[in-house]
Amino acid sequence: MRPKTEFPKPSLTADAAVFRIERGRLEVLLVRRANEPFKGAWAFPGGFVEKDEPIARAASRELFEETGLKGVQLSQFHSFGDPGRDPRGWTVTVAHIGAVRPGRDKTKAGDDAQSAKWFDAANPPRLAFDHADILNAALNRLKGAVLVGGFGLRFLPADYTAADLAGVFSAVLGRRVDPSAMGSVAGGGPPSRPGNRKRRRSGLRKTGRKRAAPEPG
């Protein structure tokens, strides 16, 4: 058996796929690269993980340095490491997914990003590296996370309505979801079946506005 030092080692990067909902449309945050490779192309905020740096911290750091966004809850969802994905050499990236609430989506480009901009997630520009694959995977993961967990609440302010939550489902799933069909509103779960409407409505105030819910994990 060869010593461990003889095995080739890839470089490690962290990328952040961050989404928002603007006027009922799902949008993704991208940065224009200032340096080669793919200078001038759009890509996810991200970069190399520093020595002894946790991967999650690297993703948050790169997101802040390149876009100015801070305090975004990021979750790892997949790794990408196919040979040739980065012309600089063998590089594995750990992709993260996150969402921002209204009023917390103001960006300011920095570090090695020429600019930072929100794009329609269904119609993005041509992306650098294999980031088109990462975007597709992130969109699939986002749909699943909204349907089975409380991820949808990350798009919403603390005081939200059933209509607000239905808007999140509609934007993410790409189809209209009626507020009256919403299921576990406090948990941000999937739309309920018609037979559950009586129980659903009992959990809402007369104004239709929910109390603040805890941040999802």
Image (tube, rainbow, N blue to C red):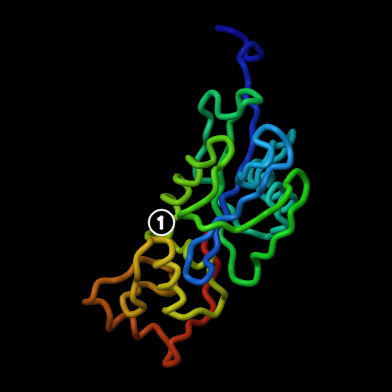
Q: Examine the rendered structure and indicate whether residue 202 appears above or below residue 107.
A: below
Q: Residue at x 39, y 54 (%)?
A: 144
Q: Residue at x 36, y 78 (%)?
A: 179
Residue marked by disc 1: 143
Please rate how many residues cluster around mark 1, counting C-alpha atoms within 10 Å: few if below 14, some from 14 to 19, many from 20: some
Residue 184 falls left or right of residue 214: left
Q: Secondary structure at mark 1?
A: helix
Residue 180 falls left or right of residue 39: left
Counting from the top left corner in percent of width and height, residue 72 is at 63, 59
Q: Residue at x 73, y 48 (%)?
A: 114
Q: How many marks?
A: 1
Q: Residue at x 63, y 46 (%)?
A: 56
Residue 162 location, quadrant: bottom left
Counting from the top left corner in percent of width and height, residue 104 is at 65, 67
Q: Residue furthest bottom?
A: 206
Residue 33 falls left or right of residue 197: right
Residue 181 location, quadrant: bottom left
Residue placed most toward the observer, 106 or 207: 106
Q: Residue furthest top?
A: 1
Quadrant in which the N terminus is drawn: top right
Residue placed most toward the observer, 41 or 15: 41
Residue placed most toward the observer, 207 or 111: 111
Q: Residue furthest right?
A: 111
Residue 127 falls left or right of residue 36: left
Counting from the top left corner in percent of width and height, residue 176 is at 35, 70
Q: Amino acid at mark 1?
A: Lys
Counting from the top left corner in percent of width and height, residue 99 is at 56, 60
Q: Examine the rendered structure and indicate whether residue 190 appears above or below residue 56.
A: below
